[in-house]
Amino acid sequence: MLVKVHFRITRDRAGLPADFSAARRIVTTDGQSIEDIARAALAADYQVPGDAVIICKIEQ
């Protein structure tokens, strides 16, 4: 399933405050938490800790 995730990044990889908002399409499968998959993928892509990623909205 393809979902659109709106998110915010609150810190950069050095731990300094940041304010970045965007949206991205993410592929998920049934039985998995969309928020967990999205947060892990976005944290890895932007090289920030997982708790720096805030999921604002999920569209299907």
Image: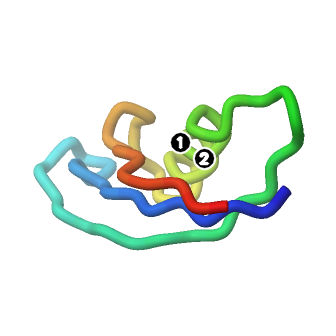
Q: Secondary structure at mark 1?
A: helix
Residue lying at the far front of the rendered structure: 60
Quadrant of the drawing holding the C terminus = bottom right
The crowd level at tag 2 (other Cα within 10 Å; few <14, some 14-19, many 20+) is many
Task: Check disc 2 and give the amino acid type.
Answer: Ala
Residue 39: image tag? 1
Quadrant of the image containing the N terminus: bottom right
The answer to whether 60 is drawn above or below residue 48 in the figure is: below
Q: Position of residue 46 (x, y in %)?
A: 47, 58
- The amino acid type of the residue labelled 1 equals Arg
User: Residue 31 appears at what percent x and percent y?
Assistant: 85, 27
- What residue would you read off at disc 2? 38
Q: Is residue 31 above or below residue 16?
A: above
Q: Nearer the viewer, residue 15 or 5?
A: 5
Q: What x and y, as percent, mark residue 28? A: 81, 48
Residue 28: which numbered mark, if any? none
Q: Is residue 2 above or below residue 33?
A: below
**Where in the figure is residue 49, as x and y percent of width and height?**
40, 36
Helix, strand or loop under label 2: helix
Distance (Cα) linking label 2 and label 1: 4 Å
Q: Is residue 37 left or right of residue 48?
A: right
x 54%, y 60%: residue: 5
Relative horizontal placement of residue 53, taking residue 2 as reference (left or right): left
The quarter of the picture where residue 36 lies is: top right
Q: Residue at x 20, y 42 (%)?
A: 15
Task: Pick whichever, 13 or 11, lies toward us.
Answer: 11
**Mark 2 vs 1: CB contact within 8 A:** yes
